[in-house]
């Protein structure tokens, strides 16, 4: 059976699938500026709750959109808040 030539419609559909991904904004930045030195307050429970999932695990960089430096600061703050009993070690 001979191969069927592609119509112009199917070519256009293939091209439209390729899209550039929008870069996520770092949620730790304050008013668009990175705090120096990078520090995340362990008492800011509202921010830290956004950085953990329902099971109580720290959300990874790919999902949260953090830079490496801010992710390290978030991790330290979450662990400190857990130790101080501001956040649970496990979720619901």
Image: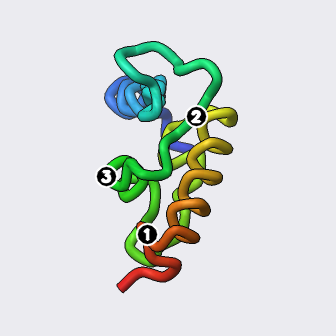
Instruction: Return the residue found at the far bottom.
Output: 92
- Say which of 47 and 60 sits in front: 47
Q: Quadrant of the N terminus?
A: bottom right
SS class, disc 1: loop
Please report whichever mark, 3 or 2, sits nearer to the chain's N-terminal start.
2
SS class, disc 2: loop
Q: Are marks 3 and 2 in contact (CB under 8 Å)?
A: no
Circle 1 residue? 87
Residue 85 place in picture, x, y as percent: 46, 73
Circle 3 residue? 46
Circle 2 residue? 39
Residue 19 visible at all: no
Residue at x-position 49% and y-position 51%: 42
Residue at x-position 43% and y-position 27%: 25
- Say which of 44 and 10 sits in front: 44
Q: Are there few (<14), some (14-19), or many (20+) residues within 10 Å of tag 2?
A: some
Residue 25 versus residue 83 in the image, above or below: above
Residue 60 visible at all: yes
Residue at x-position 45% and y-position 62%: 52
SS class, disc 3: helix
Residue 14 versus residue 42 in the image, above or below: above
Between the C-alphas of marks 1 and 2, the distance is 18 Å
Q: Are marks 1 and 2 in contact (CB under 8 Å)?
A: no
Please report whichever mark, 1 or 2, sits nearer to the chain's N-terminal start.
2
Q: Are there few (<14), some (14-19), or many (20+) residues within 10 Å of tag 3?
A: few
Q: Quadrant of the C terminus?
A: bottom left
- Say which of 50 and 78 sits in front: 78
């Amino acid at each position: 059976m001979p191969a069927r030539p592609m119509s112009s419609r199917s070519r256009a559909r293939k091209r439209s699938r390729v899209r550039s991904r929008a870069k996520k904004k770092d949620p730790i930045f304050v008013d668009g500026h990175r705090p120096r030195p990078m520090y995340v307050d362990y008492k800011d429970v509202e921010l830290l709750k956004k950085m953990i999932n329902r099971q109580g695990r720290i959300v990874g960089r790919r999902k949260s959109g953090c830079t490496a430096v801010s992710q390290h600061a978030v991790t330290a703050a979450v662990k400190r808040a857990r130790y101080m009993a501001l956040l649970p070690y496990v979720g619901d």
